Image: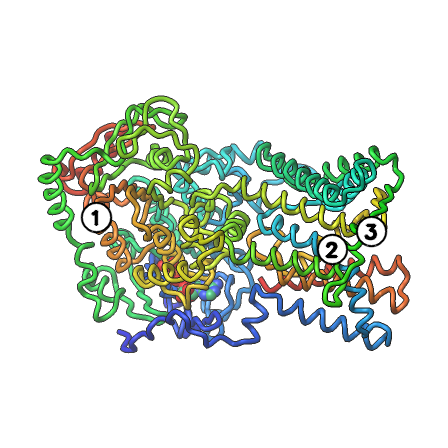
Amino acid sequence: MSTTTPEAPATVGDSRVNPVKAMLKSDRPYTVFAALIVLVVFFSVLSPVFFSAANFANIGRQTTLVTIMAVGMTFVIISAEIDLSVASILKLSGVCAALFMQNFGENWVLGAVVGLAVGTFIGLINGLLTTRLGIPSFLVTLGMLGVAKGLAFVITDTAPVLIDNTAFFKVFYEGTILGLPIPIIWTAAVLTIGGVLLHFTTFGRKVYATGGNAVAARYSGINTSRVKIYCFMLSGLLAGVASLIFAAQAHAARPDFADGLELDVIAAVILGGTSLFGGRGTIIGTFIGSLIIGVLNNGLVIIGVSSSWQIAVKGLIIILAVAFSARKR
Amino acid sequence: MTEAKPLIDMRDITVSFGVVRALRGVNFELHPGEVHALLGQNGAGKSTLIKVLSGVYQRDSGDVLIHGEQTQFKSAQDSRESGIAMVYQDLSLVPTMTVAANLFLGREPHGPLNLIRNRGLVSKAQAYLDEQGFPVKANASVDSLPFAYRQLTEIAKALMGEIKILVLDEPTSALSAGEEEILFEAVEEVTKRGVGVVYVTHRLHEVFRISDRVTVLRDGLNAGTFETADITMETLVQAIVGPGHEKMTQSTLSFEEGQRRSALLDASSEQVDVPPVIELRDVTNDRLNRVRLKVRPGEIFGLAGMVGSGRTEILETMFGLRRTVEGELLYQGEAVAWRSPAPAIRSGVALIPEDRHLQGLVLSDTISANVALPQLRGLTKFGMFARRESNRRAKSAVSELNVKAPGIVTKLEDLSGGNQQKVVFGKWLTPEPKLLLLDEPTVGVDVGARDEIYGIIRRFAQAGCAVVVISSDLVELEMLCDNIAVVHDGRIITTVHTSEIEGEEGLHQLVQESAR
Ligand SMILES: Nc1ncnc2c1ncn2[C@@H]1O[C@H](COP(=O)(O)OP(=O)(O)OP(=O)(O)O)[C@@H](O)[C@H]1O
Ligand SMILES: [Mg+2]
């Protein structure tokens, strides 16, 4: 009946896609990047202080903790889990490292190793409880949020643990390399290693598959429990790294700081385009998401928004961003 | 009442997804009381046309007239309210709820204070299922049901309530002959009431069994509409595959090749005493009861049986998904106790599972990422993922299986159902498996691709791979297999050599008898 010969099916590598539409639909975080630019322009117009090299370095330093923890959180969320305990891990790792340095001869290397080990260990516990007992990670890590924070208070008697170690300060906060402040170097290192791990290694492929469809991943021979445990351990480890930077900045580990930081971390990851349902996300997106959180925190202070309003405005922007990213699916 | 007014009149429908022009001006008509089959190759646009009808997709241009009136449904809700019931190719039940809750979803019976009456719900649902002849328990949770039962539930759900148009997108892909009949009878019942039925399928014999008319789509265009009574299988296949593909469908239509191979295998294996690739010695576990079978290299072994008979569980046990509680599982002559698929895959076992969405694919990921999944170990160089090699494999799988997709970075969720199934197959092409386990390998796959898949199965077998196939399509089983075991209730009832069976009828009888 029909006399038309059907067109040959589009071939591999065909690229007649409308670029704007493709960008909007893509998993690459173009829209978040545009949002970041808009925010920067907005604050620059409102305040002359904002747009300066000094302030940008400031933002970089202030964002360090969020960015580093957000990299770990990206792995956890792509594997379709969540880690609410990162801020508490930061507290506990920090005080453990500081106490160790205080009591065992001021050896900063050992102190740092202890801090990282504590963080990784808590991540391991989170992972084991989630996968072996099948408790949703939302609950496991909510519980761990309390446990780790409580322990940090108990072992320090709620007092800050002072650190007096110049080398430690230099390595984690006060030094510079090629003129760049060391926290920024740490951030860059974590982003690079995290990016390679997620996008260029076999482990990264397993993380995506586990979060995208755990059953299909298992049927393809992937040990999804182990993958999730590694993600939690990575999140714990990076919370440990953040705790050292934080301690070096404050010259002390303080169990009463960083409350609620996990919300900034999770917001950064989600803003960066990682799906809360798992299976989608990128490290570069997380980086941009963290910068947005950093620019907001910094910019709102500079233009003189009261701290109560800051919290509300930040919440609102996050809801808008998430609503936007949900719409395009 | 005007007889001439069609229930559905779709004119010049076009739909594009980015570069992919899924429909390029398609016409489709449905009359009251008619069963109208909609056919075409994978990616031809059948599901898209149906989704335009139901309001899941919006058309770019063209008209949809329902009862002669221009309509533009904004959502599936809209179309449901005007009496269009849909059974989608990929099921849409809520897995965590019971069958009853799914059946009454959104139209639960209410009691005083407008509260839902949960007790009444189950008994009402059960009564309805029994009346229609669906062998499904109303209080079972959907995620505990085997795939075919989910399909039956979905069909039962669509048939409920006041419907004028019933749309079935490959509703029988996992059903065997007996279960198909339940559906056909239900369809005949509703057409008597003047309901029009749109029926999408790749099983051509069904077309002749229940349809009045056939419309064939090819690459988003109409390729012909026929009265079923006026056509033959050959013309239908011709219309589907299009000009220049005549020879592709040879083996689908004849049994001979398979039987010739059988004879060859027999002659060779009696001389050399090769150990079986897989052997089950009285394997017993929660679902299996003293299962005993052997598959030699180069042999294609079929498992026949009804839905829920334990066929899938036999494959799962061979793949490390189920423990062997009693008895022994021998792989290449050695007893093994696999506790997960990973060691099985490393030893060369491949499984194509029955539910591609749940078990086979990561829909949010690309073709290339999915194809790489089972072989990540082999695709690792110094801890890094060998992207180039992975892309090369994906490309060769795409071209070998003729997957219709814009590129290997296309996401699985953007492919048509049959093309998704081809990708599940593509996961296991390299390196060649030693034991290939296939659970309904050609579900939703078009005639041309089905032949390609048969070709691949035979090629693997010729290279010495042992193959175990489950299929509800008994013709397919007989054509492919050397030996067929009939399974019932977790036991193997009999094992027969294909040459001993007298046609499809004979096998069908064996399956029926086993259930008694
Ligand atoms: N959401 C989507 N995004 C992009 N392309 C799509 C989408 N859905 C379908 N397509 C493309 O549109 C074409 C028609 O798909 P459709 O699902 O209608 O095919 P079909 O005839 O139902 O095939 P099958 O027999 O395999 O189910 C295919 O090329 C498919 O890849
Ligand atoms: Mg389809």
Residue at horizontal 43 percent and vertical 32 percent from the top: B339
- Left or right: B102, with B114 as reference point: left
* Alpha-carbon span between mark 3 and mark 2: 24 Å
Figure quarter occupied by ligand 1: bottom left
Residue at horizontal 25 percent and vertical 30 percent from the top: B293
Which numbered tag is attached to residue B463?
Answer: 1
Name which residue type carries label 1.
Answer: Ala
The outermost residue toward the top is B326
Instruction: Please say if A20 is above or below B434.
Output: below
Instruction: Please say if A151 is above or below B70.
Output: above
The answer to whether any part of residue B472 appears in the image is no
Label 3 sits on residue: A166
Q: Secondary structure at mark 1?
A: loop
Q: Position of residue B203 (x, y in %)?
A: 28, 53
Which numbered tag is attached to residue A66?
Answer: 2
Mark 2 lies within 8 Å of ligand 1 (Cβ measured): no
Q: How many marks?
A: 3
Q: Position of residue A276 (x, y in %)?
A: 63, 52
Name which residue type carries label 2.
Answer: Val
Within 10 Å of the Cα at label 2, are there few (<14), some (14-19), or many (20+) other Cα atoms? Answer: many
Q: Secondary structure at mark 2?
A: helix
What's the chain of the residue with tag 3? A
Disc 3, disc 1: CB below 8 Å? Answer: no
Pick whichever, A178 or A271, lies toward us: A178
What's the chain of the residue with tag 2? A
* Alpha-carbon span between mark 3 and mark 1: 69 Å
